Image (cartoon, grey):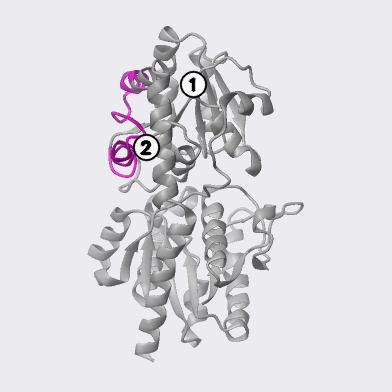
Amino acid sequence: MRILVFCDEDLSIAAGGARQVLEFSKALSLRSHTIRIVAPQPAHGHQLAQEFASLSFRPVSAWRVAGLRPFSFLIASWNVLRQELPAWRPDVLLWFDSPGQMAPLLALSNHACASVLFVNGLPEEEVQGIWRLPFVRWVLRAALKTAARRVQAVVSICREIVTQMQDAWSIPPERCHVIRNGVDGDRFHPQSHEAARKVLELPAKGPYIGFVGGFFPWHGLETLIEAVPFVREKVPSATFLLVGEGQTRQALQQLVQQQGLTDIVRFVGRADWEQVPTWIAACDVCVVLHRQTRSYPGDSMKLWEYLSCGRPVVTTVGPGYGETVEAIGCGLAAEPDDAQDLARQLLRLLEDPDERMKMGELGRMAVIQTHTWRARAQELEHVCSAAIAATRRTA
């Protein structure tokens, strides 16, 4: 298949959305499909990670001015798609949705090309700032509704998003699919604690509890910080590593300072793409929490990365997180927003190295068997093939 991929992510930044687009594109290309990506021009001085450099990329120039950037990208990407669709003649357009970015819908009005819409979140729950004005959110939702009804298939990372779209917009169930995130099992592989800590120049003595990812409200990192004193009481040598950036970092740092935890909680900042597996490997236990700030849990990419690195996980009870971890047997689940229960689960693992090793092995085994990007790409390939067949039947 010739697959034209559209997204609104700066692919030179190692953020979750960008990585999802690149990993799917790379995995599809390894399955002998021809991929071309239409995405924003990377910021000056930035470039794609070397492992994705072989992908065909059509950059779109957009103004990098707050408030104007979405509109400039909409117009510029519409113009690029109008050129790419007749010139490149893809079999299917794989559209990773961003709120308000309707360029594919406009460009497809003159082309009989199959299209698959990948939705990671609903706009009225994802947008921030001025975009949260009621009228703006109504427009964004109406645009997504129109797109979802016109494409041949809708894909999401979690069942809850698909169900909401089906119920609200009467989308036929056979056109809706759930494809969860995955992981590159070759890049995220088990390493020894000692080797990883030596590379990162960390003290060899642990234990280390780690979070590696974006700092956003739905990750509930406040609960992790509130659990730190309970853990320190039992394991004074423990260190908490918070690796990443995001909108809640400043508030989290203030909370750490207020509670006098600066000696045990370390904010590492954004890690280089190549060093993410090493930071995970340095940890004895990894944490991925979920706070109910949205009506759907999503599907945390970091969970699969932790498991692929052979690290046990403490997460939050519920769909997409605790249910997954408990089904695999690769970690423990704590009650939502309960710092004491979170501390209890962390201590259970810190005090039992044999159990940690066993859980790490089970997690790695589960990931390699069914949760790699290659497996996810095969699922997406089937959806794209069905979309092409549906388009041909209509024609």
* Residue 39 visible from this viewpoint: yes
Measuring 35% from the left and 41% from the top, which residue is drawn there?
Answer: 293
Marks 1 and 2 in Cβ contact (< 8 Å):
no
Q: Position of residue 208 (x, y in %)?
A: 52, 21
Towards the viewer: 61 or 358: 358
Q: Position of residue 123 (x, y in %)?
A: 40, 56
Q: Which residue is mark 2?
A: 290
- Give the residue furthest to the right: 45
Q: Position of residue 373 (x, y in %)?
A: 48, 55
The amino acid type of the residue labelled 2 equals His
Measuring 44% from the left and 43% from the top, which residue is drawn there?
Answer: 304
Residue 336 painted magenta: yes
Left or right? Give the position of 63 relative to 115: right
On screen, residue 380 above or below 283: below
Q: Circle 1: is it few (<14), some (14-19), or many (20+) Cα within 10 Å?
A: some
Label 1 secondary element:
helix
Which comes before the other along the chain, label 1 or label 2?
1
Quarter residue 228 falls in: top left
Towards the viewer: 227 or 143: 227
Quadrant of the snapshot with the C terminus: bottom left
Magenta range: 318-344
Q: CA distance from mark 1 to mark 2?
A: 19 Å
Q: Circle 2: is it few (<14), some (14-19), or many (20+) Cα within 10 Å?
A: many
* Residue 171 visible from this viewpoint: no
From the viewer's perspective, is the residue at label 1 or at label 2 nearer? 2
Towards the viewer: 130 or 257: 257
Measuring 31% from the left and 71% from the top, which residue is drawn there?
Answer: 175
Q: Which residue is mark 1?
A: 255
